[in-house]
Image (tube, grey):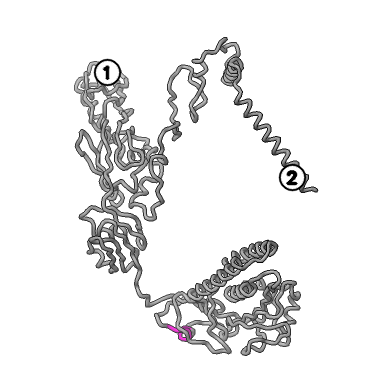
Amino acid sequence: MYNFTTTTLASKHSALALFTFLLLSIELLIPQPSVAQSIEQLQQLRERAQQTGASSSSLPASVSPLSITSQRTLPGASSTVNGNGQFSTQPRSGMTLPGEPTISTVFPTQKAMANPPFAANLFIGGFESERTTGLNENYLVAPGDKISIWLWGAVNFSSVVTVDNQGNIFIPNIGPIRVANTPAGTVNQTVSSKIRQVYTNDVNVYVNLLTSTPVSVYISGPVLRPGQYAGLASDSVLYYLKRAGGIDFQRGSFRQIDVIRNNNVVATADLYAFFRNGTLPDISFKDGDTILVRPIGNTITVETGARNSFTFEFSDEELNGGTLNYFARPGEFASHASVSGVRNNKQFARYLTVDTFSTLPLKAGDIVEYVSDNDPQIYRINIAGAFEGASQIMVDKGTRLVDLLDHIESDKTLSDTQNIFLLRESVAIKQKEIIEEGLQRLERSMYTAPISSTGEGAIRAQEAQLVADFIARARQVEPQGRVVVSENGDIANILLEPNDTIVIPEITDLIHIGGEVLLPQSVVYNPDASSEDYIAWAGGFTQRAEDERILVIRKNGNVAFVNFSDSLLSSNETMLLPGDQIIVLPAIDTKVLQAVKDITQVIYQVAIAASVASNAANN
């Protein structure tokens, strides 16, 4: 009844909302009298006038269509209405007008480049909006610039004069003085020398260039926002390119950027030269100059192994391995270069040393990888546990374990040299693969099991969710890569691998109990105690404990199984020893889950590979 009532009330609310919506829709469809519209518009005008501080008496007696239209604004525009009909002088700050094209609507969607162009980071940041506080001394004076002039002494005069269209300034009693194309650093000297030709004695002169007139420069070619931009004549090519959004990575050239004046190329910028040597063309821009970015040239992609793993653009003369080595800068240990591409419409691939690669001709579109292919003859071995001395030892290739143990110092009263074991990276990777295979098999068994009824399907869905949570947690386990190398005091003289870790356990008097026990802890070893005693000291089994097969991990990494009656199931193990870890694993209810065998196998693999349950006992 409760669910039925709730559903009924919800249905009533939905019906009421639908009915209200239909009523509103009908009201909107019925045309209203024109008088009501005019009254509503008058009320809107009064409210706007009150918000702007105007009195109600200033409202017009009648409203005309012209006055109503003047109060409307475009979407996204400022709500402030200019009563004088003047254009707003505030910048739009990137806001686009309705219908105005943007980069997202003009350019096709492109995936991010794995290896962007070399020197592409020149266009990162907002340096185009930053200027120095002082004026560039190399700036050339242009018409429209303002110059401040002071004369004192025998003659007193002060004024701010403007450079006219002919490039002159005019000073009373002096006449016109030509200053166009005069460097800013020499304006004072040029104007002062002309004044002193008239006032030779007792007149002091001070001249200062106050402002510089912006110039209009066109930017064209493969840039993101081509068009006309304003800047100073002393601004660099980089400044104007950044104003235009930078060079299009897919289509634009970083090597050939021309400055065109009166249909002639007056300068060419190479951003590679700036990136490596800091050189840019020394040019003073003028009104009407055009910066033209040329199409991209030959490209070579360096994928890995270099400090500069970018896409490089080279001219035909630069297409060789030596030029690429200069710009890409292979890593210190890079010994070979792998080249793949197309030659004469056929696949081309070479694997060369870096020195030989420097003389190899390249073709546009080649892909290069630098590889460290040196055969290591000396590698590092780590030492952990109870030892004395250095924790790392460099050994020659082919060194074996027993040969190295003679060079490790240890305290015999504290170091258990009879139970040495290794931690090896390759074994940890293999253990991870074995666990992953078990988890994948478990997934297949759960999601492909047949279903005979609807009720069974619901139960299987719940089981699948539980198994999925278990799989997610199991995949987070990182195996240790433990290698058993000692047994009964004998140590296997195995070949060492790079970055192996030799673990010398400490002598201990503890037995660690963990897993499905009430109080996981460490207990002092008692030679007369059985496994039942140790589990009892840990509070006994939990309700989910598997008491028929209890896992025991020896200090040297060996694994044994015992049952509740303390009889060992492994033939080569007869008793518990100090340092052993007793792990009680959870039992899987066969009535609940279908893939009991797979889950149990994965649990044992995780416990042995990473000692998950024993960590709880140690903590």
Residue 316 in view here: yes
Q: Where is residue 526 in the image (x, y as percent from the top left)?
A: 71, 84
- Local secondary structure at mark 2: helix
The answer to whether residue 156 is above or below residue 217 is above
Q: Position of residue 212 (x, y in %)?
A: 31, 29
| Left or right: 540 as drawn, with respect to 219 | right
- What is the quadrant of the C terminus in the image? bottom right
- Local secondary structure at mark 1: loop
The residue that label 1 is drawn on is: 154
Frontmost of labels 1 and 2 is: 2
At x 36%, y 52%, the residue is: 116
- Residues shaded magenta: 399-404
The residue lying furthest to the top in this view is 61
Which of the 4 image quadrants contains residue 346? Answer: bottom left
Gap between marks 1 and 2 measured at Cα: 102 Å
The label on residue 7 is 2
